[in-house]
Image: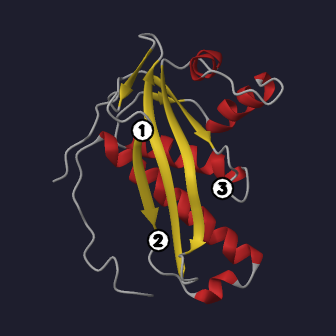
Amino acid sequence: MIPAQHELARERTAVLVDDPTNRLPRTSLRVELGESLGVALLEQELVPEVVATRDVIAFVRGNERDRKPIAMEKVAAGVGADQLIYLDVTEFSLVDRDGSPRPTATIWVRVLDIKGRERVFPGPEEPRGVEITAQLREVSPDLYRTPSSRRAVEEALVAKAGIEISKLFYEHERIDLGENLGSR
């Protein structure tokens, strides 16, 4: 078993997906990433309530001024959350460096206690956060031929990323037998 790296407070929680370098090809994937994580947290009964990611994004868009980022504490307070999970997307690619189909997402994760006005995860020794990398098994190149099938791969990758991030917060089994055996 792999232990939880952090125990979330049993508080109303918001997920803020930040993609400052526009790695995600569609902004709707921000919502899907946040919702994937939120659903996983609720299914594991780690938090009592998760604010809809679309509401978090709407609040940020409505309150940003002159392209200046809004403070995370203000975002959480604005959507009525006492805990904020901040996701910083740094990589989102459907192919690896060799051009082979290998969908990969890299996301840095931080957790803020809004009432206590402090970052609670990870500790100060990791200022950027904890890095999570999610990968899909190699997918058939045929899935990259049409826009709709590419979108399906993108959506599957953000769903997997949300689940992988949620595993930071609960004990889980390591199941990766055959993970890298190639295409199905």
Q: Residues within 10 Å of mark 1 (few under 14, many from 20)?
A: many
The image shows residue 169 at horizontal and vertical percentages of: 32, 39
Earlier in the chain: of badge 2 and badge 1, it is 1
Q: Residue at x 73, y 56 (%)?
A: 26
Q: Which mark is residue 56?
A: none
Q: Which mark is residue 129?
A: 1
* Residue identifier under label 3: 23
* Residue identifier under label 2: 136
Quarter of the picture containing the N terminus is bottom left
Determine whether the residue tagged by mark 3 lies in a helix, strand or loop: loop
* Front position among marks 2 and 1: 1
Compared to residue 95, the image places residue 112 above or below, namely: above
Report the amino acid beneath label 2: Leu
Report the amino acid beneath label 3: Arg
Compared to residue 67, the image places residue 103 above or below, namely: below
Q: Could you tell whether 57 is left or right of 129 in the image?
A: right
Question: Mark 2–mark 1 contact, CB under 8 Å?
Answer: no
Using the rendered view, name the quadrant where residue 143 is placed. bottom right
Q: Residue at x 65, y 31 (%)?
A: 56
- State the separation of the CA atoms marked 2 and 3: 17 Å
Q: Residues within 10 Å of mark 2 (few under 14, many from 20)?
A: many
The image shows residue 141 at horizontal and vertical percentages of: 60, 87
Q: Nearer the viewer, residue 92 or 9?
A: 92
Q: Residue at x 29, y 34 (%)?
A: 6
The image shows residue 46 at horizontal and vertical percentages of: 35, 34
Report the amino acid beneath label 1: Gly
Q: Residues within 10 Å of mark 3 (few under 14, many from 20)?
A: some
Determine whether the residue tagged by mark 2 lies in a helix, strand or loop: loop
Compared to residue 183, the image places residue 87 above or below, namely: above
Q: Residue at x 52, y 49 (%)?
A: 36
Earlier in the chain: of badge 2 and badge 3, it is 3
Quarter of the picture containing the C terminus is bottom left
